[in-house]
Amino acid sequence: MANRTPLMAGNWKMNLNHVEATGVVEKLAWTLKDAKYDASKSEAAVMVPFTDLRTVQTLVEGDKLPLAYGAQDVSVHDKGAYTGEISADMLAKLNVSYVVVGHSERRDYHAESDELINDKAKVVLAAGMTPIICVGEKLEVRKAGEHVPFVLAQIDKVLDGLSADQVGSLVIAYEPVWAIGTGEVATPEDAQEVCGAIRSRVAELVGQEAADAVRIQYGGSVKSSSAPDIMAQPDVDGALVGGASLDPEEFAKIVLFYT
Ligand code: PEP
């Protein structure tokens, strides 16, 4: 792997209120500390519900925890009459580092398009945060053997108009939809095939330097038992972890793979 620090990010989805979040973050931090977690080898992060952000910020900053935190979505609008939405500026004010955009659950349940996801990535970057842009195919696409061209078409759209520097700074999460929350994990070869193809496409789009710098995660039913073989693939730079990130001891084992 080139000089990329893998990112092990937990996606809590709509789980854990702010009281429960305190317990999980504290347990995670203690487990990592006891295991002499080396943050220079992999970065640990949690993507939490909006209502948990202030609590997690207070814990991380107050106790100087080796943990980044982020949000699971953002509005494309700056401010105004958009009831229920949260702006990038509001997130940046909470010292948020990462924002997940284009998760398959947002694509499915909220009809988010690649074009909207591209706009969201742009507002996140403009506010000084890092988007984690999710792409991935559904089962019928994989069965038809069309997964690589399908994902590359998503990549072309979600990266549209971004500079080489911007692309090099962001995180792409390859999450085959058939593997999310199903217990069905992609094989290490499946993950490498698509992550490698994404990196090659980034090189074609904006140059080799950005392709060497961009971090590409795998996501989809990752557990501590399946993480090592997938994380060992040359184009996989960490994981986006859903269900397993709700258990701090299990998530710590995944984070500690690189330590
Ligand atoms: C996710 O939500 O991004 C995810 C990968 O979920 P899970 O690990 O539960 O499949």
Image (spheres, helix red, strand yellow):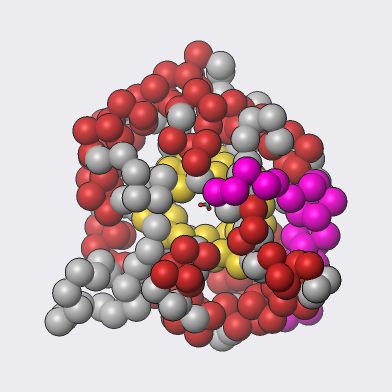
Taking 212 as reference, is 29 above or below it? above
Q: Percent position (x, y) of residue 36? A: 56, 18
Compared across the picture, whether 78 is left or right of 183 comes to: left
Q: Residue at x 25, y 57 (%)?
A: 93
Q: Is residue 191 magenta?
A: yes
Compared across the picture, whether 250 is left or right of 28 comes to: right
Instruction: Confirm whether residue 219 shows in the render.
Output: no
Instruction: Confirm whether residue 254 shows in the render.
Output: yes
Compared across the picture, whether 114 is left or right of 153 comes to: left
Compared across the picture, whether 162 is left or right of 124 comes to: right
Question: Looking at the image, how many numbered discs can be counted on the residues?
Answer: 0
**Predominant secondary structure in magenta?**
helix
Q: Percent position (x, y) of residue 205? A: 72, 80
Q: Residue at x 42, y 70 (%)?
A: 109
Q: Residue at x 29, y 80 (%)?
A: 77
Q: Nearer the viewer, residue 247 or 259?
A: 247
Q: Which residues are magenta?
A: 181-208
Q: Which quarter of the rendering shows the C terminus?
A: top right
The quarter of the picture where residue 173 lies is bottom right
Q: Is residue 77 magenta?
A: no
Q: Percent position (x, y) of residue 189? A: 84, 51
Q: Residue at x 39, y 58 (%)?
A: 72
Q: Percent position (x, y) of residue 187? A: 79, 47
Taking 172 as reference, is 123 above or below it? below
Residue lying farthest top?
34
